[in-house]
């Protein structure tokens, strides 16, 4: 406890993945949760599989960069 | 609100993805939810990773086509 | 196939739940998926458990009604 | 983007929920993601519904406090 | 690893929950996964929130018992 | 009912996938659930996308084999 599922657009760099994992883990550690107990699972979703406002993010948000 | 996760077999065409995203979004829009507030996330799962009745869909349902 | 998980704020009326279930199912039926194969699972989340822009929806969006 | 699902044991205080939502959101903001784009959804799970090592957390970890 | 999310209808007895947790954990232990590494999370969903074939399970499957 | 989502590290052999699907299905069949009603969905997650204790499993657990 906890298990954290993070849905992001495909294409996060390895450095960005490390930051997400470390950062979310630290949120819980600062609340007293043992570091070892935190699991963070990144699910990379292609932008054409992610709909916002009824459209694919690959079209609607095509200029937005992934970290 | 809402966030909708759709698990489907891998291989949906881009046209099919658009239909799923637009169609599900419209269900909520017709109920008064602002279009911009609807997120639909497609998770494509290979048929060998999808079990029905204890068997892989790649075997049990191998003749079923993906839209 | 498919399995659809819908995350919504707690408090949907029974009529609204029926509309979501029927409406999402129809999106797939119209694409040729057998009606019996569609599962739609509603997860009701209290607004204080839903964060948008770093704040609880119960505070940030407290005047928004649930269908 | 992103959508973050956080599974925790039931019983988080409202203050703890705020910290989780704000903290996870900030991880992404510091990476350049617009604050408004981050959604964090807390799923509270009763300890008897959470299995670790084949046992319910309500038995195995019964003395562990929830923040 | 692994993390297993089990969606079931609300109303499983405590004995049934124990069986699900122990049984799924054993599937992985028999494959060589350390017992301690298996997490099983039960999500109980009210039958009116679970749609099958476009209808609520509370109507369509109202006579089906929960273990 | 039930729908079971299994998150595992990427790289499970096809034989291992079959064992997971059959094994989890049997847990429910032995409790009286109809075999046809059980769906098991495997989500394979690359080890660099899976964080444990704040680190990627690809680093922290790099010597652990996938079944």
Image: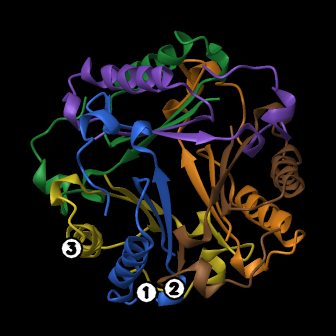
Chain colours: A blue, B purple, C green, D yellow, E orange, F brown
| Callout 1: chain | A
What is the secondary structure assignment of the residue under circle 3?
loop
Figure check: F46 above or below A21: above
Q: Residue at coordinates 58% horizontally, 45% vertically from top-left? A: E10
Which of labels 3 and 2 is toward the front?
Answer: 3
Which numbered marker is on residue D30? 3
| Callout 2: chain | F
Which numbered marker is on residue D7? none
Mark 3 is surrounded, within 10 Å at the Cα level, by few (under 14), some (14 to 19) or many (20 or more) other residues, namely few
Which is nearer the eye, E14 or B23?
B23
- Expressed as whole percent of the image width and height from the top left, the position of residue C45 reads 36, 49
Q: Residue furthest front?
A: A63
Q: Is residue E67 visible?
A: no
| Callout 3: chain | D
- Disc 2 designates what residue? F53
- Disc 1 designates what residue? A33
- Expressed as whole percent of the image width and height from the top left, the position of residue D42 reads 37, 60
Residue E53 located left or right of residue C26: right
Figure check: A44 above or below C13: below
Q: Residue at coordinates 17% horizontally, 60% vertically from top-left? A: D35
What is the secondary structure assignment of the residue under circle 2?
loop
Question: Gap between marks 2 and 1, in whole Å?
Answer: 11 Å
Which of labels 2 and 1 is toward the front?
Answer: 2
């Amino acid at each position: 406890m906890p298990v954290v599922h993070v849905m992001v657009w495909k294409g996060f760099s390895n450095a960005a993945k490390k930051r997400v994992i470390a950062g979310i883990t630290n949120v819980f550690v600062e609340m007293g949760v043992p570091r070892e107990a935190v699991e963070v699972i990144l699910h990379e979703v292609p932008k054409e599989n992610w709909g916002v406002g009824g459209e694919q993010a690959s079209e609607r948000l095509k200029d937005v960069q992934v970290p």
